[in-house]
Image: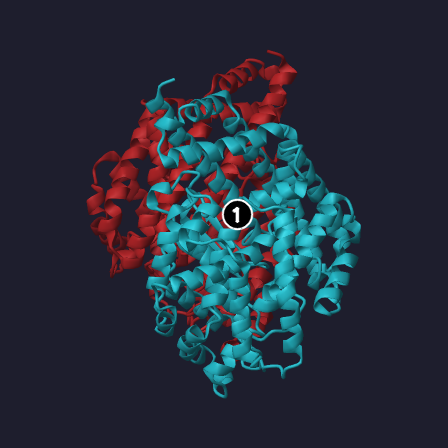
Chain colours: A red, B cyan
């Protein structure tokens, strides 16, 4: 085989795969946004066919031959080509270990299980979802054993979502968080609670939708390439390349900040994806490298920037313009306190920054227990409710507000949750480093995200998946990852809000 | 080759093609509904890849060998299999005559030209769209010559959209219409005009959206399988099979009947598609057989049922409930007259039943002239405006309200327009026949579509594409198609409204 020809074939192959992935992502996106409820089976049929074709093309002798050839000539590849070959071979070697019929029926299962989860959540009926969730957990465990028989299946998936982590590092990370957060929450519980009446009331969808589009422009999303829809559970997806990115939100009439922070959170994901260097489009290096780095960006925009004093001060006149009657009797300081109110609650996506990691920890422990066989899927709701009582001190009234609240398990994202907490911690350390060269508060007070975005683009976004998470962290931070920076950040904020 | 094996392969092939077509239809649908404006190129990349794969699979030796083998054993096939083989071979023989690179770049052209048409219409700037439209017309003519060098290219496309018709039959049909409609319009112009103030005013989107969903249920669409979105230009599309159908509408604040009749019109298309016998799903026989029969259903529900006295009488209380302030001072008779007001206007989709065919005739004549080379694309706006003055006596103020109003040319639907007028005429004759066994007026007065739908299902819908348009017409009517039935229907309505 000729090297130049193989390199050309490498690009053609990726371009073709990006088209198939575009179709699959769009089928998923449609299923969550516009599709009528009875169409899941029809969609599953199509996804089954396309997945089978992807499987055939990616495991064909033509593809694997080309990749193995290039893998044998690493010294003649540039950095991007080496990384492409490594990532593609990793994926193909995984797929080759999964029997094709199992892989195809797994894709069908995911479509059906997502549709059933929607119905189960609506009716708060875990028994509907249970048989699907059992299959999802069983398949995820089985696939991990196919992929690496010597590795603990849960470790396998943790490392897939955030390369470099495992149960041991997660246990240590979470215990470090627990040791400082639990006393902090206890201290806060003895202080007078701050009011949140300035964000509660009745807020029509129309001004909330205006706010979404305003925020998307403000934080720097390009409206030519980033779209907004509404879904039950907000998410972000790339369609084919970073040139077509979609975020979603959910409007609740009783609280405008739910959608507001969903838009900023998903907007952070979209900034990261669309910030890939242009030449990465239609390759496997396009878009973010790991869930942890992804969440470091989404939670950075949502919390570190979006709930900062400087940003709320800037945003307040816009909120007054959109909700004039409601906000007439409040100040920006009231909103700042309300959006930073610390209080154990039921729903992870509505949790404050301090209790948030406990929600994540509960999911982490449950996943670990189910995968290891110590806990049955049937007993998940009971165990969920028990842990919410133990860690957060609250009673879960029904499964809709409990074990059915997140969509992740319905699409087999098991091992994903820890990245939310890790990403939050990465973000705090990025902020500390960013402050060395960027006056973050001054920028936020003007609502000017350009210097902040420029820092993230240069240190994180532009690389897409070219660098590993470790390389990104080391390159951006110039020091080791240290969760105490995050805990310091949280404590400082609580001092400011609660005077602790 | 073994016959049973070939028959099985026939079904697998169609199932696979339906998946690819699902992906392509969804990419188009997304482009028209949710996609950000700058994503057309990204989408074109993906559609190019998928189209190339469809081309390769459908023209592969495996596929053509199987189809030719079955074609040689027609006596051992059932009716459905014979029709599948015939339709698939027709399509493949067409594709084989088009060089693959031209076919792929044509698909890319369509995506781009639709995006450009949207922008051109928005800014009323024909010069933006002109180079794309030139390519569309040139490609359509070239493909027709590839497909059948002995046939006039426009005849070729007329026959594609409505098998059995050509320029000669269309010229005759339109002149028959013109001979009775032009004097009719002239007579009406001398009568006092009926008022339309009961449908004009300011109507918020929210009650209009309620009306859409109410009407979809009323006419018998299954909400589990038929979805609604909004687009610039309303349309209907099947995604993969008749199990996932989407219709779209456009809400105008100043007139609630625009969206109301769009929903009923597109709903008629969706009833036809989703009415295919269940066993036709994932085969080439799924969904409607021709554009003429399709429009016979959409325009039947929209006009013949939707603008009938009996239906308006039934619907009026619902309209009053949704628009109470506006309709307080009107009666159902006022609405009946307003939605049947005859008046030459600029926009085809808003035209009344009587002038409608003149809009279609103008497009027919322009397409015929451009394809034959007698008219340049550059001169289309001028010629469009001249014909509107000549046939309808009105001045076209700009291209947005003129040559850029319809999306059809942007996706190369050239030869499609006549089917709107033909379908309207078929529908009137279906009504005459249906009345022999169904008390249509009594059903409409109760808002009960079941007997009407049952007649259409039995005579038209269930066949999908199993029967030819001629077979459908003959089977349903039991007599030859006669445009005078349609003209009698229109004259009777005008007598009722204008007392002619």
Query: In this figure, which residue is indicated by the disc labeled 1?
Result: A269
Q: Nearer the viewer, residue A498 or A249?
A: A249
> What subunit carries mark 1?
A
Q: Position of residue B206 (x, y in %)?
A: 48, 71
User: Of all residues shown, which one is farthest toward the bottom?
Assistant: B329
Image quadrant holding the N terminus of chain B, namely top left
Query: Nearest the camera: B323 or A390?
Result: B323
Quick check: A346 left or right of A333? left
Identify the residue at horizontal 52%, vertical 17% (top origin).
A62
- Total of numbered circles in the picture? 1
Quadrant of res A344: bottom left
Is residue A485 something that shows in the picture? no
Percent across and percent down for residue B242 are 41, 47
Residue at image location 58% in from the left, 51% down from the top: A226
- Please tell me which residue lies in front, A463 or B469: B469
> Dot 1, crowdedness within 10 Å: few (<14), some or many (≥20)?
many
Secondary structure found at label 1: helix
């Amino acid at each position: 085989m000729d090297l130049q020809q193989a390199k050309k074939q490498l690009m053609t192959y990726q371009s073709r795969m990006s088209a198939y992935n575009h179709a699959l992502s769009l089928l998923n996106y449609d299923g969550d946004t516009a599709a009528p409820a009875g169409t899941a089976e029809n969609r599953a049929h199509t996804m089954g066919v396309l997945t089978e074709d992807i499987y055939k093309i990616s495991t064909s002798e033509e593809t694997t031959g080309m990749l193995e050839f290039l893998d044998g000539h690493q010294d003649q590849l540039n950095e991007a080509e080496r990384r492409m070959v490594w990532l593609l071979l990793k994926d193909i070697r995984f797929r080759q270990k999964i029997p094709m019929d199992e892989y195809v029926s797994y894709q069908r299962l995911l479509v059906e299980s997502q549709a059933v989860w929607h119905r189960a959540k609506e009716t708060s009926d875990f028994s509907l979802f249970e048989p699907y969730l059992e299959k999802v957990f069983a398949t995820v465990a089985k696939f991990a054993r196919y992929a690496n028989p010597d590795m603990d299946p849960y470790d396998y998936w943790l490392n897939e979502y955030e390369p470099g982590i495992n149960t041991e590092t997660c246990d240590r990370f979470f215990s470090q968080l627990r040791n400082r957060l639990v006393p902090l929450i206890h201290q806060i519980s003895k202080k007078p609670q701050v009011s949140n009446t300035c964000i509660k009331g009745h807020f029509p969808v129309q001004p909330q939708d205006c706010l979404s589009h305003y925020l998307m422009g403000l934080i720097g999303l390009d409206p030519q390439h980033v779209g907004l829809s509404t879904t039950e559970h907000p998410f972000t997806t790339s369609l084919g390349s970073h040139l077509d990115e979609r975020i979603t939100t959910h409007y609740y009439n009783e609280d405008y900040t739910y959608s507001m922070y969903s838009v900023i959170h998903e907007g952070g994901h979209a900034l990261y994806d669309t910030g890939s260097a242009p030449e990465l489009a239609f390759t496997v290096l396009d878009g973010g490298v790991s869930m942890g780095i992804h969440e470091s960006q989404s939670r950075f925009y949502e919390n570190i920037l979006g709930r900062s004093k400087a940003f709320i001060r800037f945003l307040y006149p816009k909120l007054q313009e959109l909700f004039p009657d409601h906000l007439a009797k409040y100040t920006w300081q009231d909103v700042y306190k309300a959006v930073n109110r610390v209080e154990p609650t039921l729903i992870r996506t509505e949790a404050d920054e301090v209790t948030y990691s406990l929600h994540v920890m509960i999911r982490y422990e449950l996943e670990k227990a189910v995968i290891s066989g110590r806990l049955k899927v049937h007993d998940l709701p009971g165990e969920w409710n028990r842990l919410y009582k133990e860690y957060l001190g609250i009673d879960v009234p029904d499964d809709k507000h409990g074990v059915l609240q997140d969509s992740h398990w319905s699409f087999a994202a098991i091992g994903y949750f820890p990245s939310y907490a890790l990403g939050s911690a990465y973000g705090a350390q990025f902020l500390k480093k960013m402050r060395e060269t960027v006056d973050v508060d001054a920028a936020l007070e003007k609502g000017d995200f350009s210097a902040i975005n420029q820092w993230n683009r240069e240190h994180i976004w532009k690389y897409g998946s070219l660098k590993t998470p470790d390389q990104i962290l080391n390159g951006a931070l110039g020091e080791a990852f240290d969760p105490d920076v995050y805990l310091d950040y949280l404590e400082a904020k609580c001092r400011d809000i609660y005077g602790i």
